[in-house]
Image (tube, rainbow, N blue to C red):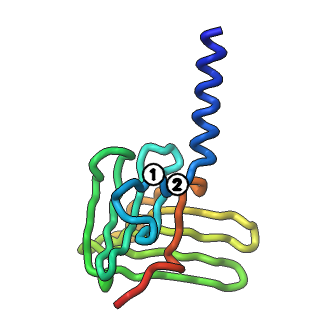
């Protein structure tokens, strides 16, 4: 009976997570209307959060529920967006520059296959892509197209 109860509790906690609002994971780190992008890695160990408060962008990356490994605050003029809509691809990304490193985070839909991809790429000038981190689409909140604005 104890095994059944434990199994039931695990199953219901997974279902409640799967049906939960990903914005609940943001907490008080930025207001809901300031979230440009949020997602967790596919293994749900780390998260990325990008917020815009007026003319300031905040980028956070690290273990869920802990102090971020990377925390950047910068003027919005240091951030670029890349929005693409054509016959084969629809995408929206933010490029956050920190010296010679760019963190590219966002969403891409391959219109031919229907595949949706959430990702975070770390790119170094002159060396190319250093890392590609796949993000869980079910945990993603993407408001890049709707909320990102430059001065």
Q: Is residue 90 left or right of residue 147?
A: right
Residue 66 image offset from top left, x and y in percent: 31, 45
Q: Residues within 10 Å of mark 1 (few under 14, many from 20)?
A: some
Quadrant of res 123 = bottom left
Residue 32 image offset from top left, x and y in percent: 45, 65
Viewer-proximal residue among 1 and 100: 1
Q: CA distance from mark 1 to mark 2?
A: 6 Å
Regarding residue 57, the answer to whether it shows in the image is yes
| Circle 2: element type | helix
Is 132 rendered above or below residue 4?
below
Residue drawn at (51%, 43%) of the image:
43
Q: Which residue is mark 2?
A: 22
Regarding residue 126, the answer to whether it shows in the image is no
Residue 38 image offset from top left, x and y in percent: 46, 61
Viewer-proximal residue among 47 and 112: 47
| Circle 1: element type | helix
Quadrant of res 34 = bottom left
Residue drawn at (34%, 90%) of the image:
151
Residue drawn at (75%, 67%) of the image:
113
Q: Which residue is mark 1?
A: 25
Using the image, tell me which numbered label, if any, was put on residue 151. Answer: none
Q: Is residue 130 left or right of residue 14?
A: left
Is 141 rendered above or below residue 75?
above
Q: Residues within 10 Å of mark 2 (few under 14, many from 20)?
A: some
Q: Badges 1 and 2: C-beta atoms under 8 Å apart?
A: yes
Residue drawn at (27%, 61%) of the image:
71
**Quadrant where the N terminus is found in the figure:** top right
């Amino acid at each position: 009976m104890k095994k059944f109860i434990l199994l039931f509790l695990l199953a219901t906690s997974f279902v409640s997570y799967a049906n939960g609002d990903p914005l609940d994971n943001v907490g008080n780190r930025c207001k809901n209307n300031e979230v440009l992008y949020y997602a967790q890695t596919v293994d749900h160990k780390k998260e990325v959060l990008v917020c815009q408060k007026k003319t300031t962008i905040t980028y956070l990356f690290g273990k869920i529920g802990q102090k971020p490994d990377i925390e950047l605050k910068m003027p919005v003029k240091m951030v670029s967006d890349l929005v693409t809509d054509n016959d084969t691809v629809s995408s929206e990304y933010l490029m956050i520059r920190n010296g010679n490193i760019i963190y590219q985070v966002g969403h891409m839909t391959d219109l031919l296959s229907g595949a949706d991809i959430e990702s975070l790429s770390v790119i170094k000038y002159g060396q190319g892509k250093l890392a590609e981190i796949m993000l869980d689409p079910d945990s993603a909140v993407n408001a890049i197209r709707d909320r990102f604005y430059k001065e």
